[in-house]
Amino acid sequence: MDIADVGWHPPAVDLPAVVAPSAALPVVSPPALDLPAAAVPPAGPPVVDTKNWQLAENLRWSFQHIADFLPTAPIWRGVGPSAVLPVAPLDMDSVLVPSGSLDEPPASVGSIMASTDTDGWMLLHQGKVLTEQYFEGMSASSPHLLMSVSKSLVGAVAGAMVDAGVLDTAAPLTAYVPALAGTGYGGATVRDLLDMRSGIAFSEDYLDPKAEVRMLEEAIGWAPAATSGPSGMYPFLMTLKQKSVHGGVFEYRSCETDMLGWICEVAGGATMPTLMSHLLWSKIGAEADAVIGVDQYGTGMFDGGINARLRDMARFGSLFLGDGTSLTGERILSSRWIEQTLAGAPDSRAAFAGSPGDNRMPGGMYRNQMWFPYEGNDVLLALGIHGQMIYINRPAQVVGVKLSSWPYPQDAAKLFGTLRAFDAMSNCL
C-alpha cells in the first residue's frame, strides 16, 4: 500500500532530495588576537572530512557539522508551532549519584556530566524543563549527530506504519523486497528486524576496521574505501550472509535498522525523510528540521545518520510518557504499539540474556528499536555510540537527553554513569 492511500499528500515545497555538502570546510578558528605566544590557543584541524571526522580530536566539531562534509537530506518539521517546553529551573547538578561499585564514592550529577564529554543535556519532568545545559560551543540551535538514537526514530516510523496498516510485523521481508530471497535476509521477518533477532552475520566491533559495521561506512561513503566492495547502502545489505536461525537470540547489529528503513520505504512508497516528516517529525512539535546523512544514491543512513537539536529529542522521548501522544496532543503511535513495546515478546528477555554481546543489562531486553536496561518496563532508552542517550522514566514522568562526543565509541563507565545520574534525578523527583 502506498502511503498516499492513508490520506497523506506531500507538502508543496521545493526541497532538494539530497543536499550536497559545500565541501570539506575548515574548522572555524577564533579571531586573531594580540596575545603572547604562550596564550594563543592551539589551532584546530585544518580540514574535517570523511578521512578524519571520527578521530577523537575532531568529534565535538564534526558531530555538530555533519552537513558540512557529508551529503544529507532534510526531514521537514512541517508548518505548525513547536511544542512549548515550559521552564521550571531546579538545581539538578548537586543531586548525588550512587557509585557503580563499592570502592567508589558517590558523585554529583554535575561532576558526571562534566567528566563524560557532554555537549549538551537536559531534563524534563512532566513536560517542564528543569535544567538545560550546553558546553564547548554547542547551543540550543546546534544540530547534533544522534548516532544510533536514530534507530529509535526509525522504529517509531515503523510503528506508525504498522498502526496505519501499511506494514506487517509478521510478514517476511521478501513480501516487500522479493530480491532478498537469495540473500542472508531470506526468511527473516519485519519483527526480526525490529527486535534485532535475525540470524545475519554482522560484527559491531567499532575498533575493528574489517568489521561489517566499518565496511558499511565505506560502502556508503562515510569513510574512504580501503578495499573494493559494494557501493551504496542497499547493495551492501544484499551481500550480508546468514549465520544462524532467524528469530533467535538478540544481537545488536546496525544493519537490522538499515534493512528496516529499506522495508519501510518500499511499504510506504516514499523515502525515509518523507515518511519521517509526515509520520513523526511534523507531529512532535519539533522546533527545527532534522537532517539525515545519505549515501551516494540518496539512501539514508538509517542506523545512525540523523542529526537534530537536543530539545527536539526531548520532544520525541515524551511520546513514550504520553502513550504515543506528542506534547502537542497529537496521536503519533497507538497505545497498542506502546503497550507492545513495553511488554516485549514472551521470550524477549530470554533472547536478550542469550545475546553473544556483553550488554551489561541483566534482566533487560530490546524491543522495537528501544533498550530496556532493567527488569520491568519503568525505564527505556534510545542509545547511540560516543554517548548519545534519551532516557525515559515512565513512573517518574521524566525524559532526559544527553548528547556527547566520547573519544571512544563505547565506554561502559560513562554509559552507566550517565544512566545512574538520570536514575538518581528521577528518584528525587
Image: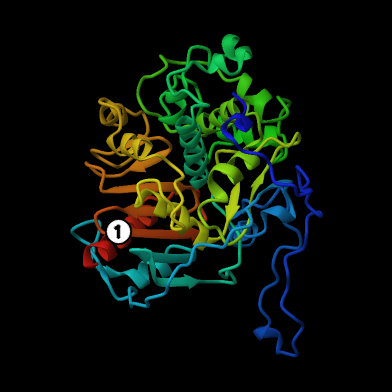
Instruction: Return the residue nearer the eye: 145 or 165.
Output: 165
Residue 353 against residue 49 in the figure, above or below: above
Q: Secondary structure at mark 1?
A: loop
Extreme residue toward the left, this view: 102
Instruction: Return the residue nearer the eye: 18 or 34.
Output: 18
Quadrant of image for the N terminus: top right
Q: Position of residue 111 (x, y in %)?
A: 36, 71
Q: Position of residue 147 (x, y in %)?
A: 54, 47
Q: Position of residue 105 (x, y in %)?
A: 22, 67
In the image, taking residue 416 as reference, residue 164 lies left or right, namely right
Residue 337 seen in this snapshot? yes
Name the colouring of the figure. Answer: rainbow
Residue at 70% x, 89% y is: 36
The answer to which quarter of the image holds residue 349 is top left
Q: How many marks?
A: 1
Residue at 43% x, 29% y is: 196
Residue at 76% x, 44% y is: 18
**Residue indicated by mark 1:** 397
Bin the neighbour count of mark 1 within 10 Å (Cα to Cα): few under 14, some 14-19, many 20 and up.
some
Residue 327 against residue 190 in the figure, above or below: below
Q: Position of residue 379 (x, y in %)?
A: 29, 49
Q: Amino acid at mark 1?
A: Gln
Residue 358 seen in this snapshot? no
Quadrant of image for the C terminus: bottom left
Instruction: Return the residue nearer the eye: 196 or 112.
Output: 196
In the image, taking residue 303 as reference, residue 47 lies left or right, namely right
The answer to which quarter of the image holds residue 341 is top left
